[in-house]
Image: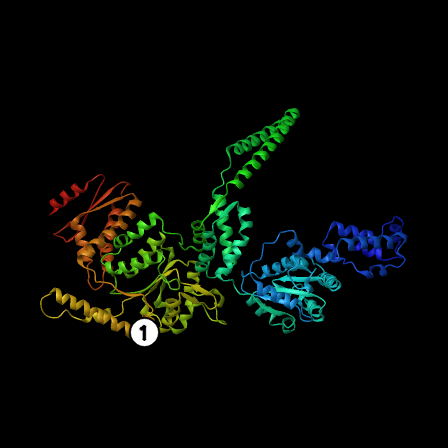
Amino acid sequence: EHLLMAILRDESNLVTRFLTELDIDYSLVKKAVEAGNPAAQADFPRDEDDEGMFPGGGSGQSGRQQQGQAAAKSSSDTPVLDNFGIDLTKAAEEGRLDPVVGRELEIERLAQILSRRKKNNPVLIGEPGVGKSAIAEGLALRIIKRNVSRVLFNKRVVALDLASIVAGTKYRGQFEERMKAILNELAKNDNIILFIDEIHTIVGAGGASGSLDAANMLKPALARGEIQCIGATTLDEYRQHIEKDGALERRFQKVMVEPTTIEETIDILNNIKDKYEDHHNVTYTPDAIVACVKLTNRYISDRHLPDKAIDALDESGSRVHISNIVVPEKILALEKQMEDTKKEKSSAVKNQNYERAASFRDKERDILDLIEVEKKRWEKELVANRETVDSEKVAEVVAMMTGVPVQRIAQTEGTRLLQMGHELSGSVIGQHAAIAKIVKAIQRNRAGLKDPNKPIGTFIFLGPTGVGKTQLAKVLAKFLFETTDNLIRIDMSEYMEKFSVSRLVGAPPGYVGYEEGGQLTEKVRRKPYSVVLLDEIEKAHPDVFHIMLQVLDEGQLTDSLGRRVDFRNTIVIMTSNIGTRQLSEFGSGVGFETSSKKFSRDDYSKSILQKALQKTFAPEFLNRIDDVIMFNHLTREDIDKIIDIELKGLYVRTADLGYTVKLSLQARDFIADRGFDVQFGARPLKRAIQKYLEDPLAEVIIKASLKEGATINVGYSKGKEELSFKVGKKKTAEDAEEAEKKED
């Protein structure tokens, strides 16, 4: 195409003369190329000087060229801009834009800047999702309604698509040619306001070595006032791209766009809900609109109103619509009949029975008409019987979006919450007071009574090693989420050095791993509803406690990239065995163990731990903790209950291998006695099970080459003071006890 047009420009060329005789000239070929590819209009922009380039171009040339230009001018004054832009005023006239509610001050300021004599180019700056593009659409709607100053009457707002201008510019100068054509059209038509969304993309767009980018091509036109332009970009991108170029920045007037308030967002949703109701074929209740705004504002903290509320409105409508679509049986039967007919027709064609195939083709058309009739009838029924979207449906969608349960407590969940203490006590033995305090915090949160700006609960678990501090956090996560995946465990012994503290929130700028985020903040961003376990907190550097102040008080933490991470739906548990060494050195004294002496010992223990806490942690840190929970020493009775829990795991593992292990009461007591240690809690019990039960059991399994279904009876022989193992296929527990008596 380019080559042919170049040949036609050369009047002395033999080919040109031959084609001219056949009434084929430059303007005709150009017109044909543009008709075949609209984007080519930018590659060959129309110019009034085109005619002067070809003097004496044949009798038919100038006539046709003038006719072509006249036709183009009558259809549009800006053909190139029409190809690379979207006319927002035309879209507003045709009713394709959503209504813009509120934003009166911003639209008024926009109109005010556009009416200026010089520097009349506003740039809308705000966070993503606050409605910058909607303000430009609002201006287009106002222009159509003539609800603007007389200066802006009959103006066109055209949104420029920069990507389509850059697309397909293979050769040097093509991009500049397109941009120049657009700028020429804008200079000749002063009734156009150019809207560039994501205006920071003009910096460097189309720029190659030794060529101009879009920003540098726009600067002279903006400075002379030849074009009017509205830009829109985010705060970060404005700072990174526009502010660096002072010459570009001074040509724009900043208009800050803040997120809408809750009341304004409710008003926006009430005005746009009709379009969503028609699209999803549902009806939104007033409660659903309020829930969309309040729940997203409360639980989605990393996005802004009104965008997140509109998302909840849209998705809740979509969820209700798709969950209630039941295709009528008649349509399903007709569709099945259609499939069968298609198969029969294909079979007839294969067998070269064309008359039969033609009859199936006619039948297929009839069925298709019937399906269309039934579908229209069904659509009418759906419109007449719209589903309702209430606040509960919105809560379900917000719960799916965030992973935080925000629905009202269902009957089954209510019953489970009431039984929570009993359920946790079955897994964590001997710590009733600690469990009671945790349960109250969870119940307070699910009932909606907790302070919305703080975490669900912040606790310090104090007590000797091996009494169940970490175990309670794991069991709590399992109860709430039915998996331990939502337990964020951070071992604070890894943060003993001052420089390692930054790993929690991310490395500072200039350091390795700057953009990777923090180990704590990233995990909470991905799982906002979780149990955060800071294990062995006293081993961390004191600067860690200063970082945690923000979490404990405001329920948020700012990471190294400046993002606010929401901790308001987390339970923060810090475990510590601080002060337990001093307690172990404190003797029980001389005399009988009376109840009053036991109470005084408990009081003394608490005072020792309290002093140790005050020495280690600052008052402002301790003052922000909801509760400091003291864990008790485990008794011999507690060990009896714990051994049953530990043995369950062993029974499951052996059952997976195809064996059954049966343990006598004497054998169980023998292991419990060997595993009981007041100072070290339940951990020695695990070692005792491993030493006295698992090691000999492994030896028996390997030696005896057991078959699947075998039973291993474990007894206790007093004389040897060790466990005995007997393998039998179908031995009962009574047989095992009789065998023990004989041994004794």
Secondary structure at badge 1 equals helix
Q: Which residue is drawn at 56% across and 36% down?
A: 377
For the residue pair 468 and 84, the one nearer the viewer reads as: 84
Q: In the shown orientation, is residue 77 left or right of residue 444?
A: right
For the residue pair 627 and 387, the one nearer the viewer reads as: 387
Looking at the image, residue 293 lies above or below residue 545: above
Q: In the shown orientation, is residue 680 left or right of residue 6?
A: left
Q: Can residue 613 be seen in this view?
A: yes
Looking at the image, residue 366 lies above or below residue 613: above
Is disc 1 surrounded by few (<14), some (14 to 19) or many (20+) residues within 10 Å? few
Q: Can residue 203 be seen in this view?
A: no
Give the x, y percent position of residue 699: 25, 50
For the residue pair 523 and 364, the one nearer the viewer reads as: 364
Counting the numbered discs, the total is 1
Q: Which residue is drawn at 45% across and 58% down?
A: 294
Looking at the image, residue 160 lies above or below residue 737: below
Give the x, y percent position of residue 416: 31, 50
Query: What's the colour scheme?
Result: rainbow
Give the x, y percent position of residue 438: 30, 59
Q: Residue at x 16, y 41 (%)?
A: 734
Which of the 4 image quarters holds residue 466?
A: bottom left
Amino acid type of the residue tagged 1 in the rendering: Pro
Q: In the shown orientation, is residue 12 left or right of residue 180?
A: right
Give the x, y percent position of residue 199: 62, 64
Which residue is most to the left? 591
**Residue pointed to by mark 1:** 619
For the residue pair 272 and 725, the one nearer the viewer reads as: 272
